[in-house]
Image (cartoon, grey):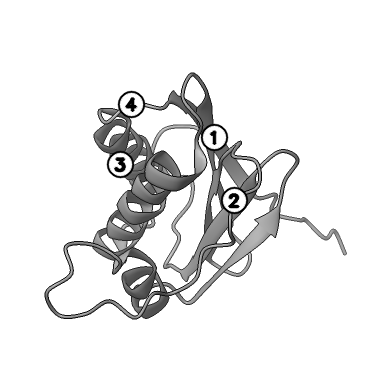
Amino acid sequence: MNETTQLPHFREAFHRRERRSVPLVRQFVREALVDWACESRADDVLLCVSELVTNALLHGVPPGRGFRVPLYLEPADGILRVEVHDSGEGEVRPVVADATPDAEGGRGLLLVAALADKWGVGERNPGKVVWCEFEVSAGVGRGRSTR
């Protein structure tokens, strides 16, 4: 009996520390979700990506540097993983804040924690990786090929 293994699908983007990077990353992720036919939770994924990238730009990416956004889809178990790699040194690990009702910010990771199935922070030298995962209905192969 022949056994086949489905390899994870992978894409990666690199962006500079610029405000316009947030919509560019959302578009990058949206295209991957369409190509991988796993759009069932696109709204949740895109909101979480926006929050993670915004946090990286505000707190983790030093001026003159950029950040990476790798995407992984494991077709066998339908897990989509989004990572945001920054290069900030000496940064405090991100935590879910206890924002007051009138605060203008501080709810990004609260949203990520509520919408993603899992999330966390990993080590990187320099910087850190903030990631989130989603169980998605993946019909990989319907769209364009992976890049």
Locate residue 3: give its quadrant: bottom right
What's the CA distance linking mark 2 and mark 1?
A: 17 Å
Disc 2 vs disc 4: which is toward the camera?
Answer: 2
| 85 and 117: which is toward the camera | 85
Which SS class for mark 3? helix
**Residue 66 picture location, percent across and down:** 50, 26
What residue type is disc 2 on? Answer: Glu
Residue tagged by mark 1? 68
In terms of sequence position, does the residue under pointer 2 or pointer 3 come before the other? 3
What's the CA distance linking mark 1 and mark 4?
A: 13 Å
In terms of sequence position, does the residue under pointer 1 or pointer 3 come before the other? 3
What residue type is disc 3 on? Answer: Arg
In terms of sequence position, does the residue under pointer 4 or pointer 3 come before the other? 4
Tag 1 and tag 4, C-beta contact below 8 Å: no
Total tally of numbered discs in the picture: 4
Identify the mark at residue 18; answer none if there is no mark. 4
**Residue 83 picture location, percent across and down:** 54, 50
Residue tagged by mark 2? 91
Disc 2 vs disc 1: which is toward the camera?
Answer: 2
- Tell me the residue at 31%/43% (across/down): 30
Residue 80 appears in view: no
| 131 and 8: which is toward the camera | 131
Near mark 3 (Cα within 10 A), the count class, few <14, some 14-19 or many ≥20, is some
Identify the mark at residue 26; answer none if there is no mark. 3
- Tell me the residue at 50%/36% (across/down): 61
What residue type is disc 1 on? Answer: Arg
Which SS class for mark 4? loop
